[in-house]
Amino acid sequence: MNELNARQKWVVVLMDLMLLAEICLSVYMGQQNPAELTAVFLKTFVPAAALTVISARIAIRFLRAPEAEQSKEAAAGAGTSR
């Protein structure tokens, strides 16, 4: 697996902080009505976490180093030149 560059690492750190904030908010919202804690938590955390993770994956792909793209294309081209 390729190593992440500095910008990609910042995206991962931001994603972790966002997930932490989302879980805190979801627990806070759920504890307002203890009888429905689980339902409120799942309704708020799961969609927010999914959106955060998907957005982070897209950002990490977008922020790939140009060298990684070129080496990937060269490797693919070398394998099909028989």
Image: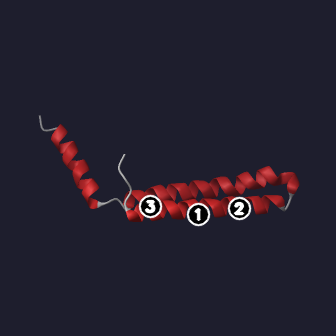
Q: Quadrant of residue 52?
A: bottom right
Q: Earlier in the sequence, mark 1 or mark 2?
A: 1
**Where is residue 50 drawn, in percent x and y?**
58, 53
What is the number of the mark on residue 30? none
Q: Which residue is mark 1?
A: 17
Q: Quadrant of residue 5?
A: bottom left
If the image is split into quadrants, where does the C terminus sit? top left
The amino acid type found where label 1 is placed reads: Leu
Q: Earlier in the sequence, mark 2 or mark 3?
A: 3
Give the CA distance from mark 1 to mark 2: 11 Å
Give the CA distance from mark 2 to mark 3: 23 Å
| Callout 1: SS | helix
Q: Which residue is mark 2?
A: 24
Outermost residue toward the left? 82
| Callout 2: SS | helix
**Where is residue 57 drawn, in percent x and y?**
46, 55
Label 2 neighbourhood size at 10 Å, few (<14), some (14-19), many (20+)?
A: some
Q: Which residue is drawn at the image coordinates 71% and 62% (left, top)?
A: 24
Give the CA distance from mark 3 to mark 1: 13 Å
Q: Which residue is mark 3?
A: 9
